[in-house]
Amino acid sequence: MSRRTWWSLGGLAALALLAVLMTVDIMPHEEYVPEPEAAVPTEDTIPDPPSAYGIPLDGFVIDQQHIKRGDTFGDLLAAHGVSYGVVDSLVNVAAGSFDVRHMHVGHPIAYVFTSDTTALLSYFVYEVDPVEHVVFHVLPPYDVRVGHRKVDTTERALSVEVTGALYNDLANAGGDPRLAMLLADIYAWTVDFYRIQKGDRFSVVFEEHTVDGQPYGDPEVLAARYISGEMTKEAYRFAQDSAMGYFDAEGNSLRKAFLQAPLKFSRISSGFSRHRFHPVQKRFKAHLGTDYAAPYGTPIHSVGDGVVEKAGYTAGNGNYVKIRHNSVYETQYLHMRKILVKLGQRVAQGQVIGEVGSTGLATGPHVCFRFWKNGVQVDHRKEELPSADPVTPAHMAAFQQERMPLAQALDGAGDRRDPTVEF
Ligand SMILES: [Zn+2]
């Protein structure tokens, strides 16, 4: 038996033990106080025998590897003494639940052998992803089973004072920096992320997922609170009529008709002005747009649902796109390196329509964003934009019931000296 096999077995046994420890909640949340009497093991605390992929490992040895380029299901099994006749049977049994041609390079696989001297291959396992795996029983009766690992979800609350970039502040407080991106999305319609200042505060209640102790998937924001001076903007996640959204404490949607900006992270290099000195033309003229500077290739998002009204090139605009959102509003995006939509195409809010460039009259990579209201160019940052649908009266009681504990969690996160509170 190879050293690797033993290591794997030991690792699995340790994982199994850890899983048991976690289910009996032995991890202390507060200072550990020993039990006054020796605890008598109950049925719940007797560890399960070591197992992997739902296979009891008593009497078995597991060898974990990865799919390599050129590997096929048939060849992998044949190399361990399985006949092609048996391979055919397994492929047939698997049909409907898993297609063996869909095994991808780099995915983990496992061979499970009997631990006696015959070392007979009994199971072959393919991991579809960190959660789902397919277990083939390669001895009669031939059988294929799709198994799932348990996804553990932890709810946490975090409160940070803005000192610089939000993702750094979150990371320094022990949070996932991806929360910054999620918050930027949630607040896209209500908070101007270009006006966030030092001393502002974000509190967030979120869920993190793990599989066997390893992070799995993106965190999910359940509630957030942004405080800037006298202003407080709250966001509570709630599903109504199968649509998930974020709402304030009164149930108003945080979604507005438009995103605040066509780029997620950038800086405003030049604001809307009826009179400014043009950096390329070297003369005073109106700048009826807002310039957002960002690196070449940064995705440009449509600020609202709409239809592409223009997509082309002019000497001044460079590559540009104009979108009509409705009878009132149109937006335009200039100096693109690349246009990613076509004339007449319908686009969704947030959809990537191009990449930041410096085509046309531009000194460096940026988007010149222009906004029309009733055919007149206006400063979109001064417009009062409409809200999307609020929580309906029929859902209001359920919304408030879900919201209350989240509001309390936000309060708790804000009051602690230690910014990270697990509960
Ligand atoms: Zn401009």
Image (cartoon, rainbow, N blue to C red):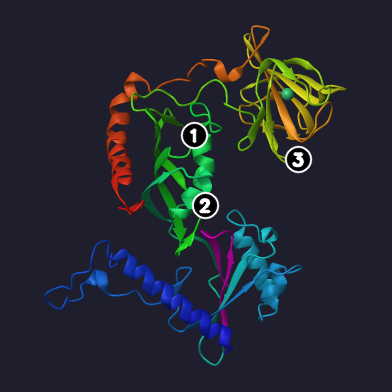
- Residue drawn where x is 79% and y is 26% of the image: 279
Near mark 2 (Cα within 10 A), the count class, few <14, some 14-19 or many ≥20, is few
Residue 311 at what x, y percent from top left? 80, 23
Please name the amino acid that badge 3 sits on. Answer: Tyr
Q: Nearer the viewer, residue 423 or 70?
A: 423
Residue 257 at what x, y percent from top left? 55, 20
Q: Residue furthest bottom?
A: 117
Q: Quadrant of residue 291?
A: top right
Q: Which residue is under mark 2?
A: 217
Examine the rendered structure and indicate whether residue 406 appears above or below residue 24.
Answer: above
Q: Earlier in the sequence, mark 3 or mark 2?
A: 2
Q: Quadrant of residue 43?
A: bottom left
Circle nearer the viewer, 1 or 2: 1
Give me the C-alpha separation between circle 3 and circle 2: 28 Å
What secondary structure is marked by label 1? Answer: helix
What secondary structure is marked by label 3? Answer: loop
Near mark 3 (Cα within 10 A), the count class, few <14, some 14-19 or many ≥20, is some
Range covered by the magenta-colored residues: 120-138
Q: Earlier in the sequence, mark 1 or mark 2?
A: 1
Q: Which residue is under mark 3?
A: 296
Mark 3 touching mark 2, by CB under 8 A?
A: no
Examine the rendered structure and indicate whether residue 159 appears above or below residue 277.
Answer: below
Residue 67 at what x, y percent from top left? 67, 68
